């Protein structure tokens, strides 16, 4: 894998520390509620795995998969539900776990969709927030990092299914792009 076009933005140590901080905040709100953590595939799977391993109370995990990117670096704006929940969330405490909130379109779609299923509570945990690209306002209850308007890969985030395995979060410099 060519790493000459990658620049580390958030180190694995910073990620680990932030995951522990987020878990401590989540623990305060959910320690006695057996919440359902809903990971948004594919990007959140690494973050979700690390997060749930730090939660020392009963919880369950489910996944949904949305698509708005295709194989490019820009959202198409058209949100598609590729994989839906396989359990009822009516009356459950639900924590949506997302890798990055960018335009807000996908997560707003998901939050609205889940709200209609009448959960007892519904909160959002996002490892990264990119407010400079926001088109739809969303409430992030647990926020890891605020990141600049650059394309990010690593720690589950990809470019055309590549780079998910990187332990750090990196910027992807396109050919001919200056740093």
Image (spheres, rainbow, N blue to C red):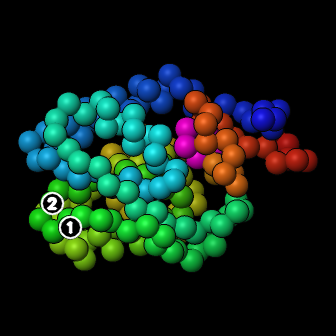
Magenta highlight range:
153-157
Camera sees residue 129: no
The structure residue drawn at horizontal position 49% and vertical position 26%, both measured from the top left corner, is: 14
Q: Residue at label 2?
A: 92
Q: Position of residue 83 (x, y in %)?
A: 43, 67
Mark 1 or 2, closer to the camera = 1
Give residue 4's quadrant in the image.
top right
The structure residue drawn at horizontal position 72% and vertical position 33%, both measured from the top left corner, is: 7
Between 25 and 37, the one lying in front of the other is 37
Q: Quadrant of the C terminus?
A: top right
Using the image, tell me which numbered label, if any, was put on residue 161: none
Toward the right, the furthest residue is 176
Compared with residue 39, is residue 68 higher up or lower down, i.e. above or below? below
Between 21 and 93, the one lying in front of the other is 93
Compared with residue 27, is residue 135 higher up or lower down, i.e. above or below? below
- Horizontal side of 36 relative to 106 (left or right) equals left
Q: Residues within 10 Å of mark 1 (few under 14, many from 20)?
A: few
The reply to whether discs 1 and 2 touch (Cβ–Cβ < 8 Å) is: yes
The structure residue drawn at horizontal position 55% and vertical position 38%, both measured from the top left corner, is: 155
Q: Residue at label 1?
A: 88
């Amino acid at each position: 894998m060519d790493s000459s076009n990658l620049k580390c933005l958030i180190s694995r140590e910073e990620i680990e520390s932030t995951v522990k901080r987020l878990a401590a905040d989540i623990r305060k709100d959910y320690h006695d509620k057996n919440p359902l953590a809903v990971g948004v595939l594919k990007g959140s799977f690494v973050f979700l795995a690390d997060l749930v391993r730090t939660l020392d109370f009963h919880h369950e995990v489910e996944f949904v998969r949305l698509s708005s990117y295709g194989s490019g670096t820009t959202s198409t704006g058209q949100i598609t539900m590729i994989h839906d929940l396989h359990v009822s969330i009516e009356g459950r405490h639900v924590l949506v776990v997302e890798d990055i909130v960018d335009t807000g379109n996908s997560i707003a779609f998901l939050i609205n969709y889940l709200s209609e299923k009448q959960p007892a509570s519904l909160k959002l945990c996002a490892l990264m927030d990119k407010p400079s690209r926001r088109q739809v306002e969303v409430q992030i209850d647990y926020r890891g990092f605020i990141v600049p308007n650059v394309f990010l890969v690593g720690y589950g985030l990809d470019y055309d299914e590549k780079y998910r395995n990187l332990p750090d979060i990196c910027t992807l410099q396109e050919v001919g792009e200056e740093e």
